[in-house]
Image: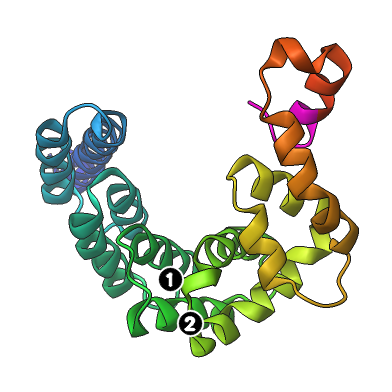
Amino acid sequence: MPQARAHIPLLLLGGVLLWLAAQGLLAMSFADSALRWQAHDADLARVAASQAQQLRPWSSGQAQLLATALPPEEGLSEGARALALAPADPYSWGWYAMRRSYAQDRGAGLELAVRRAWELAPHSREIAHQQALLAAYHWPAAGASLRAAWRPWLELALRDRDALALAAAQARVESGLCQALSGEHTLRRWCEVAPDFRARCSQPQERLGPELVYRCFAAGFLG
């Protein structure tokens, strides 16, 4: 009998762990559903996001996912929740900057997020790539202070210049990127030819020929 009693706490602990695991899997399923539905049914996305929030209100990673799944204004609140849950996580700050960007917010909140991410992870190539594209998109309308916050990210992203050029072309922000990188830089020659290449690659594919189609696709200007 004493041995049987000794096993009860272990059984209870095992049951709790199983319940938490099942709850986590269910929350992930709801979060994934919210992400899938975001472009097709905003109401269903909100319902799925709400269920995920209730099941795992402490998960900053899930909050980041929901920040992506929800419309811009609602995504901002999820981004803020992710920051509250993990204030020292540079990826949360990077995601929050993205949500600010999607909401067309170029104010102090966006600049704070950009600077905070740099303070926490000044060597992150992944965040640098993300922030360089945001900078390229917003550069023409960004103020001096926000541009200054993005400059170190741009310099870091240039260390992988081919990947940066490809991503900028695919996102159709090469013009903004080249404005942001004014002066001497390793993509200067690419910036000189990019407008002409964009114009050539914008023609109907039947007029381009197989070789040029391949080159346009490989450079990110087609597809």
Q: Secondary structure at mark 2?
A: helix
Report the magenta residues as a range. Answer: 216-223
Q: Could you say which disc has been placed on residue 30 in the image?
A: none
Q: Is residue 221 magenta?
A: yes
Q: Tell me residue 181's x, y (percent).
A: 74, 71
**Do callouts 2 and 1 mark residues in contact (Cβ within 8 Å)?**
yes
Q: Which residue is mark 2?
A: 116
Q: Tell me residue 2's x, y (percent).
A: 15, 45
Q: Residue at x 70, y 35 (%)?
A: 221
Q: Could you say which disc has been placed on residue 93 in the image?
A: 1
Q: Tell me residue 149's x, y (percent).
A: 56, 83
Q: Does the image show residue 214?
A: yes
Residues at marks 2 and 1, CA–CA distance in whole angstroms: 7 Å
Q: Tell me residue 39's x, y (percent).
A: 28, 32
Q: Secondary structure at mark 1?
A: helix
Give the image quarter of residue 126: bottom right
- Residue 140 or 218: which is nearer the viewer? 140
